[in-house]
Image: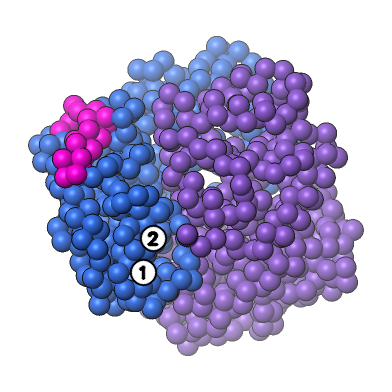
Chain colours: A purple, B blue
Amino acid sequence: MPERSLIFPEAEFRERLARLQSLLHRDGLDALLLTTAPDIFYVTGFLTRFWESPARPWFLVVPTSGEPIAVIPAIGQDLMSRTWIKDIRTWPAPDPSDDGVSLLAEVLSEQTPDNGRIGIPKGLETHLRMPLGDFERVADRLGTRAFVDGTNAIQRCREIKTEAEIEKLRAGCAGADRAFDSVNSFAYAGATMAEVFRSFQIKLLEEGADWVSYVAGVAAQNGYGDVISPASDTPMQRGDVLMLDTGAVKDGYFCDFNRNFAIGPVSDDTRRTHEALWYATQAALDQLRPGMRAVDAHAIIATEIERHGHRVVGGRQGHGLGLSLTEWPSFTELDGTELRAGMVLTLEPSAFVQNDRILVHEENIVLRDTGPELLSRRAPFTLPELL
Amino acid sequence: MPERSLIFPEAEFRERLARLQSLLHRDGLDALLLTTAPDIFYVTGFLTRFWESPARPWFLVVPTSGEPIAVIPAIGQDLMSRTWIKDIRTWPAPDPSDDGVSLLAEVLSEQTPDNGRIGIPKGLETHLRMPLGDFERVADRLGTRAFVDGTNAIQRCREIKTEAEIEKLRAGCAGADRAFDSVNSFAYAGATMAEVFRSFQIKLLEEGADWVSYVAGVAAQNGYGDVISPASDTPMQRGDVLMLDTGAVKDGYFCDFNRNFAIGPVSDDTRRTHEALWYATQAALDQLRPGMRAVDAHAIIATEIERHGHRVVGGRQGHGLGLSLTEWPSFTELDGTELRAGMVLTLEPSAFVQNDRILVHEENIVLRDTGPELLSRRAPFTLPELL
């Protein structure tokens, strides 16, 4: 008898399901169809890196009452049967003539009334992880039932983390903290970014990450030009500021924060910009409260950066975090999402050092009734200098 | 001036574009819209792990003649400008009121005639990496233009690897070969799978992987129950067969093969099944030729497994490989895709040891006019025994 593979006790998943179903009810949906790894893991505990293969779609049907139904390729039967999900329907994927289409349509029809409304995430930060042609074929088979936008239900549910989830996120951040502590052992003038990335990933694994889904970084004089680059073979030079950013995964949960380091002495502009970002983070740590909106978080951070004489970089100054490297909301001037207790968020102020050179700084928090509680260990006020 | 970030010379991308455009022309398409990381990397060389963030969509519009147009979030401007792509249009994403919708619709309208046909991959092994609601909004704005299935064009193009791509794939496989050589240093009775997975990922990085997107594995007596599990905390026992499978990435290209090991002496059934898989692989290495179909590859492998007295596991016995962990075609009884010279493929025979216990074995090849050329180093005939 293979062991069960639950990351959490069954009661945790049942509590999530109850909250999700009450949101489906509120939104007038008869069922929700989920297709992505984080959505399906959230409800079932089904955790596998096999999502990396685009060959097969996976479906979870969440009815408004009763238990979820997994509609999945036969290759996943064994692993899914070790979660708390009991109703598992499989087909021998990949089948070019009918790759789960008729099975999924059958389950959706069985679980919803005529003229039923089936939610599917269609909004910002979502995508449909199945062939679009097959989705159209399923929709055709549903007769009087219709697919409607179910983004609100799944996002309002997932965005409030349980204490069990927060423990996972805290553990992941702590591992990344320890990996950042060791950066001085492999980052120095002359080392290439490719070497630094490799060593950093190894440290993250050694410090407890199950896998490392995201590393970005850059080293340059007076700040950097972008924050999403992969490693280059350019050696670091004295006077560079090095930024390393990671999304390491522990039990399915991401951390997402970065650290900056001076490779030998750096310019005063660079140091002062780093301090401005520290102050902006501190302002958010002091002032953020449930009931504010994402736009308010942006305003707190932007105001503090400007108060210290720096221009804010366009784009977001923080975002949600959890089962994906980034989740909604976005701390921009445009996002009116309410901030609620239990949200796990990144504070990510960014400012221009000079011209087009920027610095970015990031911490991870959980928002409590009383304000933010740090999950990452607070970065030092003074940019640390590596030899 | 930041360095360019091309993985290949510009001529490589221009040759790919020419082939892709001739297929668009053949299929009567006026443009192709690409949204996924591998499709966009294939044409542009834009390589970043930032795809891990679902917050922002990215678009590439490939007209039937002329150069591709990147329609991307402003955060990607710097990195995209270091590829060979010249025409880059950006918007300040994420924008909840218009997240690239009007900009994308404008570019598609500009690049295609009235009543134009815009291809988008909708078939097997594809998905649309943008919010479905935004896709519907773009479609609404296109007036008389229509989205049609463009799967055939992009898949027929990508499936034939250039020699430059094959070199990348060969290098990735060689790194994984070396990592597999070191399994005896960390896999032994008493070690947990979590420890084995961690050490294996570290070895893959040390042996040159840029990152490790996929590791799966399992250890059990007389074969295993599934091949997609993440690590467990169960210690391995003497008599277990250990399977480790990896998709490590080098310059954007995946390897995908596994190895089996005996943890001390294992059952005769296990050994004989491993040998049957070796023979089945050998049959495919000897007999596969361009012009055969994916179904023929399945038949060669299945026949040889049965000839050695074993039952074949349902599902596929090999598949394509390249910019994703798995690509089309699938070696099943149902896939009629033609095998062509230049395809990189996995041979992945699987057989029952007894009851519901299975073994799976995998090698990576490039199909030449004369038959398969191995990219992975051939696994030994006899199941290797670790102490």
In the rendered view, would you say A230 is above or below A278? above
Query: Can residue B188 be spotted in the picture?
Result: yes
Is the residue under label 2 in contact with that under label 1 (CB below 8 Å)?
Answer: yes
Going by the image, does B108 lie left or right of B83? Answer: right
Categorize mark 2 by other alpha carbons within 10 Å: few (<14), some (14-19), many (20+): many
Q: Which of the two discs, 1 and 2, labels the residue nearer the N terminus?
A: 1
Residue drawn at (25%, 77%) of the image: B387
Residue A196 in percent (x, y) is at 43, 73
Residue drawn at (41%, 30%) of the image: A95
Chain letter for mark 2, please. Answer: B
Going by the image, does B188 lie left or right of B194? Answer: left
Categorize mark 1 by other alpha carbons within 10 Å: few (<14), some (14-19), many (20+): many
Using the numbered discs, state the Cα–Cα distance from disc 1 to disc 2 in whole angstroms.
11 Å
Indicate which disc residue B180 carries. none
Indicate which disc residue B217 carries. 2
Q: Nearer the viewer, mark 1 or mark 2?
A: 2
The amino acid pointed to by label 1 is Phe
**Label 1 secondary element:** helix
The amino acid pointed to by label 2 is Gly
**Label 2 secondary element:** strand
Residue B7 in percent (x, y) is at 34, 52
User: Predominant secondary structure in magenta?
Assistant: helix
Residue drawn at (57%, 49%) of the image: A37
Residue to which mark 1 is pinned:
B200
Q: Which residues are magenta?
A: B289-309
Q: Nearer the viewer, residue B128 or B93?
A: B128
Query: Can residue A235 be spotted in the picture?
Result: no
Going by the image, does A360 lie left or right of A298? Answer: left
Chain letter for mark 1, please. Answer: B
Residue drawn at (51%, 62%) of the image: A3
